[in-house]
Amino acid sequence: MKNKQKIFRWVKIGIAIYAILGIALYYLQEKLLFHPVAIHADSSYHFSQPFTEANILLDKETRFNIVQFPPADTPAKGIVLYFHGNRENVNRYAGFAKKFTSKGYEVWMPDYPGFGKSTGKLTEAILYEEALHVYKLARVRYQPEQIILYGKSMGTGIAAELASIRDCKQLILETPYYSLSSVTRLLCWMYPVNQLLHFKMRTHEYLTNVTAPITIFHGTSDGVIPYFNAKRLQAVLKPADQFITIKGGSHTDLNRFSLMQQKLDSLLQQ
């Protein structure tokens, strides 16, 4: 009898822990998925290359801040819309702009709501709406065949969604996920993730509607978005699209590998 009571007590404790963690996943998922660093609107950036800033005012609470890097000493032959990862703000990613400006491209890096100088509520829908507004602003000066959409990590789902509804020269994804929910499910397999998550970001669905050339870079030692998860995207690529495997590459160091450097240079020269 005592053993049954003890077992029943532990079962109740287990159920309580399961419920508490599930509730935490539901209500705290934004803090678990995103790690922004806000910057006051009046503060100044200090980058090693020239830049300007633009703002898109959506409503009284929502402002999208975009840092714009011009090409080096040459008229721009096109533009790269760079959708960054889930950490900090443009400060963390600005150094990557040189890879594109040195090849004659202007680079725009928008910050998401709550990141940098951007404000407003962070939702999946608003991320897509921001990307579309940035694209429309770019279209004032550039034709679709001059626009490259680039997504890094969390930003790959945003770039893929935009490419599925708007024309562009090419879509480049660095360390993408099959879907955000599929990555979350690897850690929270015991929960109904699809029902709990507010952020699904179904990259695999978006890619089926992308008519532009697609190039994917992913490392075999990625500890954040496992290689096998990204590799599933190859099944939805067009015959001419490319999935480039960086052997030994992790989530943050692909740009150090000569294979990615050479291939990216080749793409930017087209």
Image (cartoon, rainbow, N blue to C red):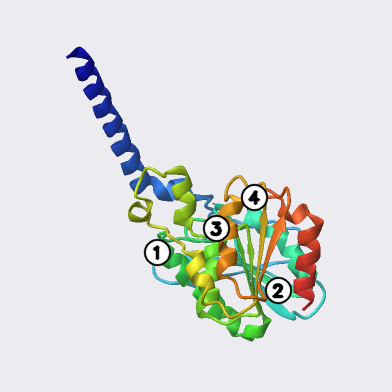
Disc 4 and disc 1 in contact, CB within 8 angstroms: no
Counting residues from the start of the chain, the first of labels 2 and 4 encountered is 2
Q: Is residue 255 above or below residue 132?
A: above
Question: x%, y% of residue 259?
Answer: 79, 59
Q: Are marks 2 and 3 in contact (CB under 8 Å)?
A: no
Give the Cα separation between the discs numbered 2 and 4.
25 Å
Q: Are marks 1 and 2 in contact (CB under 8 Å)?
A: no
C-alpha separation, residue under disc 3 versus residue under disc 1? 30 Å
Q: Quadrant of residue 237?
A: bottom right
The reply to whether the C-beta atoms of the residues labelled 4 and 3 are less than 8 Å apart is no
In the picture, the disc for residue 106 is 2
Amino acid tagged 1: Glu
Q: Is residue 105 above or below residue 90?
A: below
For mark 3, does the 10 Å Cα neighbourhood hold few (<14), some (14 to 19), or many (20 or more) residues?
A: many
One can see residue 62 in this view:
no
- Give the residue at x 20% y 13%: 2
Callout 4 environment at 10 Å: few (<14), some (14 to 19), or many (20+)? Answer: many
Instruction: Report the amino acid beneath label 3.
Output: Tyr
Sequence-wise first label, 4 or 3: 3
Question: Residue 162: x percent and y percent?
Answer: 52, 73
Front tag of 4 and 3: 3
Q: Quadrant of residue 241?
A: bottom right
Q: CA distance from mark 4 to mark 3?
A: 11 Å
Which amino acid, by three-letter code, is at mark 2?
Glu
The residue under label 4 is 251
Residue 110 percent location from the top left of the image = 57, 65
| Residue underneath mark 3 | 177
Q: CA distance from mark 4 to mark 1?
A: 33 Å
Q: Where is residue 44 drawn, in percent x and y?
A: 63, 57
Residue at the image position 59 percent from the left and 83 percent from the top: 139
